[in-house]
Amino acid sequence: MCVLILLLCSVKSYAQEKMLTLNGVVKDVNGPLAGVLVWQTDTENGTQTNELGFYTIKIPMNAQVTFEQLGYKPQTFTVKTTTLNVTMTADENMLDEMVINAGYYTVKDKERTGSISKITAKEIGQQPVANPLAAMQGRMAGVNITQNSGVPGGGFDIQIRGRNSLRTEGNAPLYIVDGVPYASQSISDQSLSGLLFSSGNVSPLNSINPNDIESIEVLKDADATAIYGSRGSNGVVLITTKMGKGDKTSFSIQSTTSVSTVARSIDLLNTDEYLQMRRDAFANDGVTQYPANAYDVNGTWDDNKYTNWQKEFIGKQAVSQNTQFSVSGGSGKTNYLFSAGHRKDETAFYGDFGYKRTNFLLSTNHTSKNDRFSWQSTILKSSQKNHLMATDLSGKIYLAPNAPALFQEDGKLNWENNTFDNPLAALDSQYFSEIENFSAHITLAYKLNKNLSLSIRTGLTEMQNEEFKTIPNTIMNPAYGYTSAVSSNTTSVFNRSGWIAEPKLNWNFSTENGRWDALIGATFEENKLKRFALRATNFLSNEFIFNLANAQTQQIITDTESQYRYMAVYARLNYTHQEKYIVNLTGRRDGSSRFGPNNSFANFGAIGVAWLFSRENIFENATWLTFGKLRASYGIAGSDLIGDYQFLNTYGITPQKYDNTIALYPIKLFNPDFSWEKTKKAEIALELEFLKGRIATSVAYFHNQSSNQLVGIPLPGTTGFNSVQANLNATVENTAWEFTLRTQNIKKEFFSWSTDINLSIPRNKLVAFQNLEESTYANQYVIGEPITIKKVFNYLGVDSETGLYKFEDLNNDGIINDEDRKTVANIGVKYFGGINNNISYKNWSVDFLWQFVKQNNYNSDYYFNTIGDMSNREKRALDYYSENNKDAKYQKPTTGLNSEAVQAANNFRNSNGVISDASFIRLKSFQLQYMIQDKWLKNSSLSVFIQGNNLITITNFLGHDPETNGGLLPAVKTFAFGFNFKF
Amino acid sequence: MIMKNIFKMRYLLFLLILCTACEEFVEVEAPKNQIANTKVFKDDITAKAALNNLYVSLLTKGFLNGNTFGNGYILGCLTDELKVTTNQITDYRYFFEGAVLSNNNAVKTIWNDSYHQIFICNNIIEGLQASTGVSSEVKNQIIGQCLAARGIIHFYLSQNYGDVPYVTSSDYKVNQSISKTNSAEVLNRAIVDLQEAEEILLTVPSSAERIRINQEVVQAFLARMYLYTQQWNLAKQYAELLIDNPTFELETIDNLFLKTSKSAIWQLKPLNENGNAMEAYSYVFTSSPAPNAELTQSLLAAFETNDLRKINWIKVVNASTASTHSNKYKIVGFTTPSQEYSIIIRIEEMYLIAAEAAAELNDFNATNTYINAIRNRAGLQSLNITNTNDAVNSILKERRVELFCEFGHRFYDLKRRNKLNELLSTKPNWKPYLQNWPIPEVELNLNPNLKPQNNGY
């Protein structure tokens, strides 16, 4: 590539020593380049370009000025004019320098031996989302993220390379924020938030502002994760926050306003259709005189009334406001960044509820004059406030469409003379949560000599969640005659604190043909979790419900403290031969307090190799191939996600007393003999770049086997418990193909278009399970099938004679019972991925990401009882069996009195009839941005943007949302606009 | 190369130091809310605390709690005591409508909770038998209560579910594949447990609250079990033991469910300080239509006119719709101090057991004495029964109006007298197979030895 120098202004000469103000715009083929270092050669006089590529520097005439940016060829000019516009050229060799954070070490992207995906601030910033995990959706091969609930403050499920463990909670990855492990387990008391969030899951990652993140790296294979030993088997998510750079003091203000609504609404029956279904149900049951409590059909409620409850309860437009301010700068070898953000979200629910978050980030770094000593520190502080009703109203949209008005004329809640269980009564039961998070880390490094450096990283984290949930008597039907004596308020405080210290020694050494890199280090970590919960009941008046002291009865429900300690030594040895052959050895010895004294320690390790074959002589003249690498890795990582103290045989103190004396309860079935779960991971991958990097692609295949599964083995109730913690002699295999493709479709001076595609085709299989048939898993798993299967009845359609659902009678005994529930149905992802496009034209740029998932899942029929009971259904339910419609999709309605129909409906829910395609293609994120470049803005830049999230969903899914289901608020679509001003 | 070796050695040294110095680092102290199993059974106080948990569990779960999800309420709906008025989907509504499926939540929960209570008993028994720290007097009292509770819970399990496993150890390796025992045999084994408990338990001092299992409680349950197993002599003998015991008296109708009731043989004390029995929360409502369920017309019709029990124990909320609720327990919420404790078993039942057993033994004098004692104190005239068949019918009717809404007596009485199908006259949805609940579906999946499923499910 040639170097282009554009001198747009006329050239004038001045006296040599004279200072002048040089300015101009730096771009590459895609447009303006931000963050390019502009400095007077061999001096400390320098600056950086802003978002618009604009720079200004005071510099003597005829001095040398250098333009530098990672990945581009540096350029030096002699100053002759006051304006100098520069076009930077990508340096094919310099691209090697794209550096990937692998946790304990960094590695050049082209020389890495492991499998690591990365997204940067650019992609994260395109989405108006509150949780960093949301920004990762659809962007990484092998990383499957699903949102639990559309309620702000809720959680996400993340699976990196499939399910290794039979335990759902055993599949969480390790999160590391700026080098400090971030406990990802929910920080909420399920008894308080369980009706709002799936399993009461409140993700601690909500406390991190996505705008503060510089990059997220996901470590996937053995080579990358084995150095995290016992905690690496489910992958590692490394979050790096932004740091200050450059000397120029710069300010940035960004503000975004967004509007969210439920992404997909469903079509429910109107009053006529609904009442017809109900009347048919009574007729089918042989009931002619409608019972007194059939208020919807017996005339108690108005037959002609219609309310769209979906719109009423979850149809609100939720407005969010997100404001961000930052200042950064530095001088010489010291830099800082301070950023503050505030976010406010409303909910789609009825009522005035919402979520607020305030974030602060302070990052500073310094290098000593002789470059031997350096330190870097980050302090993160956030507080979140969530105020919601204690129950998700999404389940209430199935209220009879002719149900009475919510309020009486006097504004009071309408109970319609006790005949109407008003869903809004639930609004009186409220949930409050205040989460305070503080984390700090500091890294000190000292270069002992040219080859050897010593560093220590220490970190502190503290997170506290104070929740309370009120249940006043007014949520109950007044017919109970309850008073505030039954009102209650439960308060729970979760406090998780921890520290980590990691000393590390780095050594590198170059010989004529090769380069050695080694490190050895240790980890000491402690985490404490304190929980305290208090339930207060018997209030004099509901006015006092927020003050526990006013309750006549207080009860301590929980008062616990648990401790987790962890230590490890780890090492890495890497050798690169002739810049072509690379061997990477990593290992770790781990000790964890979660295992009994006899099993506390275990070893993990991996080997990774890479061959950069494009650097072999035979490819020297192959201009079409820019880069080619073959890499492979094999190793063992583990998981200790089993909770603390599981090896102890103990009694606990119950919150209740009997006759005013304490009670002790047996906590669990005791089994001391369990130990580490291990995952063997193997991977082979090919990475290629063609035509000077305009096409870059990679293909990876991995094969992971997890054995010695650590699970709560389900037990029948006759044992007194539901499960016992033990290692299971079972092996789960995860394999997958992962593809990525990046193309630079158009690359013109003012116009460019690039596309990123990722695709993962995972396969999960239970390969071995000793005595499966005799075990309690016999009805759950099949060897050779995925662990996501369900054993169900084989649904044959509606019987044209009886009008009931029909199922295959496998053992031909004439009855349908558990013996016939043997058909295997797979609920799970077949493939998933994303297609991202970036198009820019002059000052305009458009980014949009399509996410696609091919999967089967339960559709909304799974969540319903019989057709014909007193709840509304989706429109498709109209296709029910009747004399005139014998070829129906659904069986004949019953009010519940026909127990055969109830049984059939129940079997239907346990059949493959309710499992259907839940695939979707979704416009996950969209951003249109315009940068205003104008004379009057001078040193500053202004961009305005429109963003969208989940804007379009294409799916055949029967139900609300193919991603979040299960009666919780579905994912929301968000439309946002905002601006960013830097000066 | 030499340099490399030197470094390698340094690393090894470094590693070695770290490993040896810090093995102790990963040893953590036990959490402050837990106490080692072995320590629990080292002294009297902690052993008693472990037993307290049994009572906490009985009050909140399983067969003997007064909640709407408890056995008493559900059996009231399944038979002809309660008419469900709610149109919400609840477990008890399924029972009311006769649509009981093997995945019904109450079917599963009551099963699991009961076996958990049995685990508590077995674990304490085993812990104490291995212990040397607990005094033998305390040891016997605790073991006696655990044996009795184990027998009583198994008794209820077999009444509801038919053939069920009889679990006498806490070893999950045994219990996870345990087989069913014939329901008659379950009763026999329950009786053996109770007999053993009777021997070691002490009698209750008359001044004390009657909130724990003692010798009298065991005798009362034995009387009931002998009746159910048609051992008439023993049933009469044991019932009379209690009738003749001066601790217990027929309490006046309006004071019967107070905590000071002299009728009570065993009460459970509310968990909350100043709390009252849960039953009031479940049954009481103040305006019609009832939010959950109301008493059935057939129950109201079963009362004779001027029966004090109907006047005192039934509250008419709305006369025009005949909407009524059980008013045995009246206090919803708190009082200082507590006034009502939940009665698990009481002396009136002993009179009725004695009357029924006597009738089977053709001792109609005794029958008349006992049944009329119950009737007269309710303001009803004496009967003069002269044959067993009349006696049985009169006693069943008397039991119906005396013991309604108290832990499922109606269901058990009809079941043991093979009269459940008479429910068809008022419950068109009744099906004969409902006499046994289904074994929970998940249970059959996890332990195939529990197969086959009960008939009808």
Image (spheres, coloured by chain):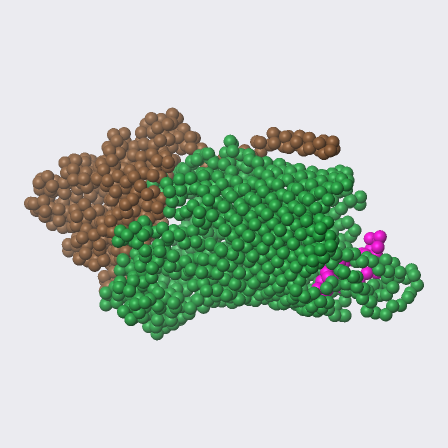
Quadrant of the snapshot with the C terminus of chain A? bottom right
Q: Colour of chain A?
A: green
Residue at 47% x, 42% y is A731
On the image, the x and y values in percent for residue A962 come to 47, 60
On the image, the x and y values in percent for residue A822 come to 36, 50
Q: Is residue A219 above or below residue A147?
A: above
Residue at 54% x, 42% y is A680
Q: Is residue A182 above or below residue B7?
A: below
Residue at 31% x, 35% y is B168
Q: Is residue B280 visible?
A: no
In the rendered view, does B343 fall on the left or right side of A787?
A: left
Quadrant of the snapshot with the N terminus of chain A? bottom right
Q: Nearer the viewer, residue A637 or A250?
A: A637
Q: Is residue B184 magenta?
A: no
Q: Colour of chain B?
A: brown
On the image, the x and y values in percent for residue A69 come to 75, 56
In the rendered view, does A843 fall on the left or right side of A280?
A: right
Segment colored magenta = A30-59
Q: Looking at this rendering, what residue extends furthest in the bottom direction?
A: A304
Q: Is residue A50 magenta?
A: yes
Q: Looking at this rendering, what residue extends furthest in the left direction?
A: B386
